Amino acid sequence: MRYLHQSETLMIQTTLSIIKPDGTQRNLIGKIVARFEEEGLEVAAMQMRHLSRREAEGFYAEHKARSFFDELVTYMISAPVVVMALRGENAVDHNRQLMGATNPKEAAEGTIRKLFGQDIGMNTVHGSDSPAAAEREVGYFFPKTAIF
Ligand code: CMP
């Protein structure tokens, strides 16, 4: 057992992860979930679902004014996705590190987007980018009673 130094805080967080259509359609669900689990993130909630246009638009509402918004929404409803709540120490940043940069071309070696991403749209996974976003995004898909 390791004792925490006074300056260290153990931050257990819950963050949202989505395996996007290019991940579900290329049979990558197991590999991606295994990666999270091997790296110490726990699946606290999980559901496969085919998003409606309205659900995808609401989820990505912060990007509404962006030129890629329609393309993003159309892509996210093109096939089922897997939505997950992941829990662990500093889960928001940890998940972002495991995913790599948004654009797979810029993602670090060994990250999920580097390994599997095809382009900036078909980048295989989504992850909350801050604790505030995580709270909103987890709540968008899962009621508190569905998080274990
Ligand atoms: P994600 O983490 O799901 O958050 C918003 C998504 O918009 C992002 O991943 C990308 O897949 C997608 N996207 C598509 N085009 C662009 C773009 N030009 N710049 C940034 N994000 C983009």
Image: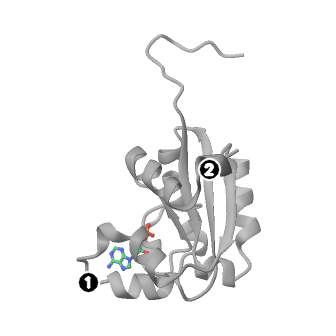
Dot 1 falls on a residue whose secondary structure is: loop
**How far from the left and from the top, in percent, is residue 69?**
33, 81
Q: Is residue 113 above or below residue 6?
A: below
**How far from the left and from the top, in percent, is residue 36?**
67, 53
61 vs 38, left or right, is left
State which tag comes first along the sequence, 2 or 1. 1
Image quarter for ligand 1: bottom left
**How far from the left and from the top, in percent, is residue 46?**
69, 60
- Which residue is identified by label 1? 67
Q: Amino acid at mark 1?
A: Ser
* Total residue callouts: 2
- Nearer the observer, 105 or 43: 43
Q: CA distance from mark 2 to mark 1?
A: 30 Å
Q: Classify 10 Å Cα crowding around label 2: few (below 14), some (14-19), many (20 and above).
A: many
Residue at (43%, 53%) from the top-left corner? 136
Q: Determine whether the beta carbon of the residue marked 2 sits less than 8 angstroms from the nearest atom of ligand 1.
A: no
Residue at (51%, 75%) from the top-left corner? 123
Question: From the image, which quarter does the N terminus lie in?
Answer: top right
As drawn, the residue found furthest toward the left would be: 65
- Which residue is identified by label 2? 86
Question: From the image, which quarter does the C terminus lie in?
Answer: top right
Residue at (68%, 54%) from the top-left corner? 45
142 vs 25, left or right, is left
66 vs 133, left or right, is left
- Nearer the observer, 75 or 98: 75
Q: Amino acid at mark 2?
A: Leu
